[in-house]
Amino acid sequence: MAQPPKTGLGLGFEYRGNPPVPVVTAIEKGGPADLAGVKVGDTILSVDGVEVAGIRSDVRELLLNDRPQVCLVLQAEGSLLSSGAWGFIGMGSLRVPQTPRTVVITRRREGSQPQENSTGKTSSLDPSAQAAKERGKKLFQEEQWEQAAQAFTEALGTRSPPDHTLLTNRALCNQKLLRWDLVEQDARLAVQLSETSVKAHYLLGKSLQEMGRLEEAQTELTKSMSLSSSKQFKSYRGSIEVALLSVRKRLWMREQAKQDMEDELTRGKMMDIADACLAAAKARGVPPEEVMELFDLALLSLEPID
């Protein structure tokens, strides 16, 4: 007999089954699990460090606690490969297992419900936080960056669960104010709350770029680019591409400068060797042209072959 779906106890998701394979079956739109990046079809591998496969009781007992946050290790449903992809006929389809990932869900306090904002999108913010967010957006449009950042800070200071959009909005204000350390700080927190946030990865990459941490910036901007394939990010994709190209150009220029410096050092060392050879030849009465001929042959032997 099929088991009924089980609630996530203020976490905003439902699941079916007991260990070793409890699977997420439903996500509350705009709820804590949705904001944390939980997806339908995810298998729950562990709860707060306790491996689900190693327990005999219901996962509900692990989820039922007084902690404001719950840390889950999840594994998405594997991608499907047809028999043709394997080159065999009659073998059916195979699923490629996905890499487990960690999410942190902030439990919704009792009695709070998702709200709808002015755009009609579901939000888990309480009314006071939502009002502060809307005020911040208005101030941002009016180019009052400092006041907008303060409004988003006010929204983050309420008792609502942490919202990654508030963090990215405040990061955008600090980007306008060129406070790159604060942009990095908020963007990192936003990524922790939503690993699939295009804006969070972009802002993190942009702040790292401005602070000269180019390898890290390239990683984050590449992630943002890979997540921005849908049409809804079309307008944002141009900014990501520009930033990523700029980072790659700076990395190339840095490597080129490093190579030029190494080449210059090598030429300097070779000149020192040539001078030493000429001095030794002169002391022994060897004609200088013979020494230089041998030296040129030695240099040719070091030239790379294409």
Image (spheres, rainbow, N blue to C red):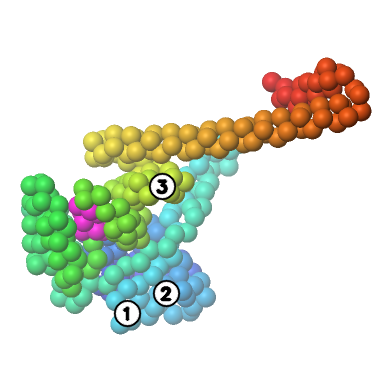
**In the depicted structure, whether residue 291 falls above or below residue 96:** above
Q: Which residue is mark 2?
A: 48
Left or right of residue 78: residue 291: right
Which residue is located at x 88 percent, y 29 percent?
Answer: 283
Q: Residues within 10 Å of mark 2 (few under 14, many from 20)?
A: few
Q: Amino acid at mark 1?
A: Arg
Magenta-drawn segment? 164-174
The C terminus - image quarter: top right
Q: Amino acid at mark 3?
A: Gly
Residue 170 magenta-drawn? yes
**First reached walking from the N terminus: tag 3 or tag 1:** 1
Point out which mark residue 234 bears: none
Q: Which residue is mark 3?
A: 212
Which residue is located at x 70 percent, y 35 percent?
Answer: 269
Instruction: Give the spatial CA distance, label 1 vs label 2.
Output: 10 Å
Foreground pick, 300 / 228:
300
Disc 1 and disc 2 in contact, CB within 8 angstroms: yes
**Residue 148 x/y as whole percent:** 13, 56
Instruction: Give the spatial CA distance, label 2 vs label 3.
Output: 36 Å
Task: Classify mark 2: helix, strand or loop.
Answer: loop
Residue 114 seen in render: no
Instruction: Give the spatial CA distance, label 3 vs label 1.
Output: 39 Å
**Residue 150 x/y as whole percent:** 14, 61
Task: Classify mark 3: helix, strand or loop.
Answer: loop
Point out which mark residue 67 bears: 1
